[in-house]
Image (spheres, grey):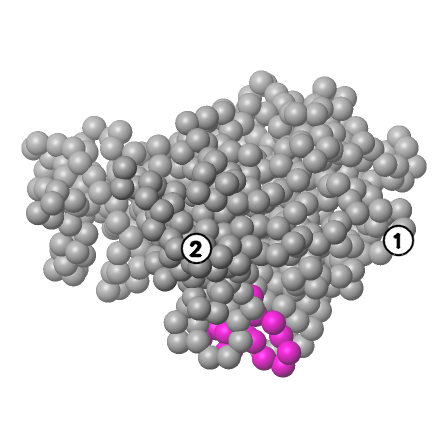
Amino acid sequence: PLGQLNIVTDLQHEALARLASGGSSSPGVHETVLGAIYQHVASKPDSEAVRYDGRSYTYEEILTDARAIADTLVAHGVGQGARVLLLSHQSPVAVSAVLAASMVGAAYVPLDFEAPAARLSSIVQGAAAAALLVGTDAYGAQARELVGDSIPIIDLQAVTNAPHTGMGWTPQTLPTPDDTAYVIFTSGSTGAPKGVVVGQRALLHFSRELAVIFNMVSDDRVLAFARPSFDVSVLEVLVPLYVGAAICIATVEQRRDPEILADFIRDERVSVAELPPVLMPQLSGDFPDLRIVSVGGEPFPGSLVGEWARNGREFWNGYGATETTVGVTFMRCEGQWSTTPPIGRPLPGLHAYVLDTHDQLLPPTAIGELCIAGPSLADGYLEAPSLTANSFHFAPAVGERIYKTGDLARWRPDGNLDFYGRNDRQVQVNGFRVEPSDIEQVLSTMRCVEQIRVEFLEHHALGRCLIAFIVPVAGGAETDVAALRQEAANRLPEYAVPRRFVLLSQIPITPNGKVDRSALGRLLVRLD
Ligand code: ADP
C-alpha cells in the first residue's frame, strides 16, 4: 500500500532523528514528586510553601494537613489504585488534598466547580471514585447533589481544622512510579468528557525537566492562577513544591480583576508566572521580580514577546496537551515577532515526530501531525480502550508508543517546531479546549433540532466565537432559541455555550460534500 511507502531518505532520517530528540533527561534522585517534597519538609520544615490571602503556610503545615487528609482517606478505605474527586478552588487545603491522594497511592480527579451539573455528573459517573473531597462547606450542597450518599464526602476544612492526633508531620507511604497521579477530564468528541490518566512517572518527568529549563529553585515564588481542574495547575503547584519553592495562590477576587492581579504579582514578588495570553495586555505596570513568564495552551500574538521579554526576563511558549502531561515542547522567545512564535523543541527525554496519516515519518519540510513519545505520555483514557487505542499506539516507523496530538506542525530549519492548528475541529476558546462536535451532540438531543453545525467563526461584534447553525425540524417556526441556549448552558461549560444561534433551512455543503464553512461565515456577515 502507498501509505506504507517510506518517502524519507537516509539523510533526512538522520536529520529527523536529531530534530525529534529533546536530548537526554536530567538525572533525578527521586522516584516520585512526593518523594522530593518529603525531603524538603524534612530538611527545611519552616520554609514557605504557600502564600494565600495574606497568610503564609510552611512546608510542614501543608504536609501536616495532607497527612490528616490522608489519614481520613485511609479511614474510609481509600488506598492504592483508588480515585478521589476534588471539588475546590485553588487553595492551601486543595494543595494538601492533592498531596494526600498521592500519599495513599490514589489519584486525584479535579472537578471544575463552575461546570454545569450535567457535565459534572457525567465526570463523576465516569470517575468511579471512592470519595469526594470538598474545599470548603460552600461546596457542600453541590457535592451532595453530585454523589448523594454513594461515596463519603470529606470536608477538607473540617478535617484540617480538627486537632490532629499526631503532633506535626510524619511521613506516610510514597506512591510507586506506576501509580496514577491524577485523572483530568477534557472535552471529548462523543459528547462525553474523557478522563486522561496521568501516572506518577509522567508527572515526575515533566516536573523535573520543566524545573531544569526554567531553572526553578527553592527561592522562586510561583503564581498559581489556574483552577485545579486544568493541568496548568500542575505546573503552578506540583513543580514548585518539587523544587522546594513557594506558591503564591491568587484568590478568586485577585483572579477576577487584572489590576488586583497585577498588584498581587508585584506585592508577592512572584518570580515565575504562567499567564493566559488574553489577560497579559491588561496587566499594567512593571514586575521587577518576575524573571520567567510562560504562555501556552493556544496561539498568541507575537507582539507579547517584545512587551514581556525585557530586562532579562525570559518569555517561554509551552506547547502540550493534557494527554502529554501539561507541556512537551518549549521555546524561549526573544526579539520581535509579528506572528505567533514557534512552539520549540521537546523537553529532554521526550521525542516529537511529524507524521502522515499512516504514521509514517514526513520529510523535515512537510506539515503533518505532531506526535509525541516518551515518559510524559498519559496512560490513556479512563475505561475507554478504543478511544485510547486511537490516540495512543505503537508506531513502527519510529519504534515507540506515540500520542497523536491532532495538531499540525512542521520543523523549522533552526530545529524548532511551528504550529499549524488542528487537523480536526477542536478549537481553543479563550484558552479552553472545545470540541464543536461536543456541543452539536448535546444540542442535537433537543426535539426541535433536525441538523446542527457549530463553528468557531469571526463575528464582527463579538470577535472569534462559537456560533450554532441550526436546521429546525419541519414546521420549526416555533424553534425556541432561548430554550436551546438554556439547554446548552445547563449541559456545557460556560465557554462552550454558543454566543449566537442561527436558524437555517439547510446547512450549506461544498461540491465534494463537506460543510461549507466559508458559506457559513458569509451568512453570518449578512445576518448581523
Ligand atoms: P493544556 O491544558 O495542557 O493546555 P489541553 O489538553 O487543554 O492542554 O489542550 C491541548 C491543545 O491546546 C493542543 O492539542 C493544542 O491544540 C493547543 N495548544 C497547547 N499549547 C499550545 C501552544 N503553545 N500554541 C498553540 N496551541 C497550543
Comes first in the chain, label 2 or label 1 = 2
| 444 in relation to 28, above or below | above
Return the x and y of residue 528 as percentages of the image width and height: 17, 60
Where disc 2 sits, the SS reads helix
Return the x and y of residue 20 as percentages of the image width and height: 51, 55
Classed neighbour count for the residue bearing mark 2: other residues with Cα under 10 Å, few (<14), some (14–19), many (≥20): few
Relative horizontal placement of residue 325, taking residue 405 as reference (left or right): right
Where disc 1 sits, the SS reads loop
Q: Which residue is mark 2?
A: 10
Q: Quadrant of residue 253?
A: bottom right
Question: Magenta span covers which residues?
Answer: 303-317
| 147 in relation to 102, above or below | above
Query: Residue shown at 49%/32% (left/top)?
Result: 381
| 128 in relation to 222, above or below | above
Foreground: 43 or 65?
A: 43
Q: Which residue is mark 1?
A: 44
